[in-house]
Image (spheres, rainbow, N blue to C red):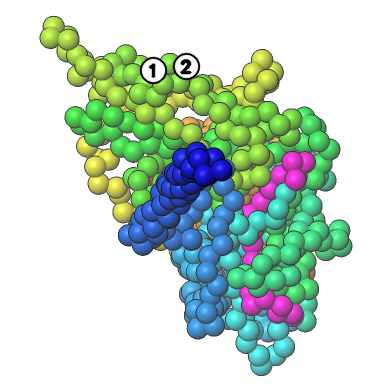
Amino acid sequence: MYFHEIALQPAQFLLLVGVLVATVLLLVQCLRWYCPHRLLRTCWKLDSQEEPVSDCTAPPENESPRQCPPATLPEMAAFYRELHTPTQGQTMVRQLMHKLLVFSAREVDHRGGCLILQNMGISLLIPPGAVAVGRQERVSLILVWDLSDAPSLSRAQALVSPVVACGPHGASFLKPCTLTFKHCAQQPSHARTYCSNTNLLDAKAWKPLGKSGVHASLDECRIQLTHFSLYTCVLEGPTGPEARKWLQLAVFCSPLAPGQSHLQLRVYFLNNTPCALQWALTNEQPHGGRLRGPCQLFDFTGSRGDQCLKLKYISEGWENVDESSCQLVPHLHIWHGKCPFRSFCFRKKAANENEDCSVLTNEIIVTMHTFQDGLETKYMEILRFQASEEESWAVPPTVSQPPPCNRLPPELFEQLQMLLEPNSITGNDWRRLASHLGLCGMKIRFMSCQRSPAAAILELFEEQNGSLQELHHLMTLMERLDCASAIQNYLNRTHDDSPAPVLRGGAWQNQGLELELELDEKL
């Protein structure tokens, strides 16, 4: 028995050693798994401390916007105070509380008043009698260029207008006020107005408005407001190709300076509204980009086809830097009005020793085709671009702030538009009015490409600060007695006893010359 116990001792020893070895191996394995993760978390914390990322940075177009930290009460008070401070008829563009806003404010008494956002196609009319006698109210008109404030849309819905706020929120008047802004729906019956009865800094709660007090014309939405809040317009038509909206294709690039070897071209796909184009112009200012030629209209359908931009031709001496000659824009980015753009980058080719490419490369000509995926054979737009080396482009010209312009009453504007729109055999239509405003043949042909040439001419007349008496005088000179009678009837209804301004010699010619120079820049 003594020998049997001695024989078992080595086995027990080996078992004890095996348990110890297994324990050590298991402990080592746990340490190897735990330490790297802990070190990785430590490194991540150090990196995040060294390079903090702001939560308010503008997200890419394929990501949802991040939430900004909540505003404090003093910040909110300063925000609304600046929005409601009278701007003396000027249109202001400001970055306030992480929002890019365009606004105008003024004081209104019992005589009423009108607020206009210059070049945005947005106005707010407070009629006489809306404010009690002896009182003054501060009102503001705000264009919101923050996409996070737009309604959450389904695939069947499209954003066809800007988001507009009237302030102060919740203000009511003795008479309804009229808010007017542009939309790009092809069928006005498909455009539905939405309202968010919230403050500008609060979470939005968009709900459709009833049809009472809402009127959508060919390209304009007019709302009779009983109180002030946020408003926009959404396309809610049948799904598929039947649902359509108008786009404007805008081509931008920086000046081609002498000796420059690279050039970037950017094509924006925008809603066909004035404020969408102004947003692109504002977005291009920090990069020195300029609009090259007039925008082209595009018939965009709700068939869910992505937008293709295909490079077809580059002039000799230049080559495409990008790997692909075709770029896609997701359908919903355009359908939901996110103002996307696509770009191509070109560079000059290296010249051989025996070749002189300086003559070939001092200008570039590019041709592009754009269409919806699957609809190339049915509908396609051709974009042509040309730029040459210009010394004058090195310093951008100074742009003076345009003076506040008068606005024709909406009902009279539409009546004159309907009377002047049809083309007359004698040319005594909107084209004759354009000639009286100083436009030449090339400018008139440019205006004929607009959706409504008559509306465009009347808007130019407004920008020239023309009065109803002056327009009546012009219609009489044109022998358009129907238009002159419509203006006279409106003046009689409103009992306007203000003296008619005297036409100074050469005033219209000088304004026409300024307008011609402005159109030259656009062309």
Q: Amino acid at mark 1?
A: Ile
Q: Residue at x 78, y 77 (%)?
A: 175
Which image quarter holds the C terminus? Answer: top left
Whole-percent x, y for residue 48 in the image: 39, 58
Local crowd at mark 2 within 10 Å, few (<14), some, or many (≥20)? some
Q: Is residue 273 left or right of residue 365?
A: right
Q: Amino acid at mark 2?
A: Lys
Q: Is residue 167 magenta?
A: yes
Q: Which mark is residue 312?
A: 2
Whole-percent x, y for residue 408 in the image: 64, 60
Whole-percent x, y for residue 184 in the image: 68, 44
Q: Is residue 20 above or below residue 497?
A: above
Task: Pick whichever, 425 or 254, lies toward us.
Answer: 254
* Secondary structure of the residue carrying numbered label 1: strand
Q: Which mark is residue 349?
A: none
Whole-percent x, y for residue 326 in the image: 50, 22
Q: Is residue 123 left or right of residue 264?
A: right
Q: Which segment is the magenta one?
A: 154-173
Q: Which mark is residue 314?
A: 1
Q: Is residue 466 above or below residue 458?
A: below
Q: Is residue 41 above or below residue 88?
A: above
Q: Residue at x 38, y 50 (%)?
A: 285
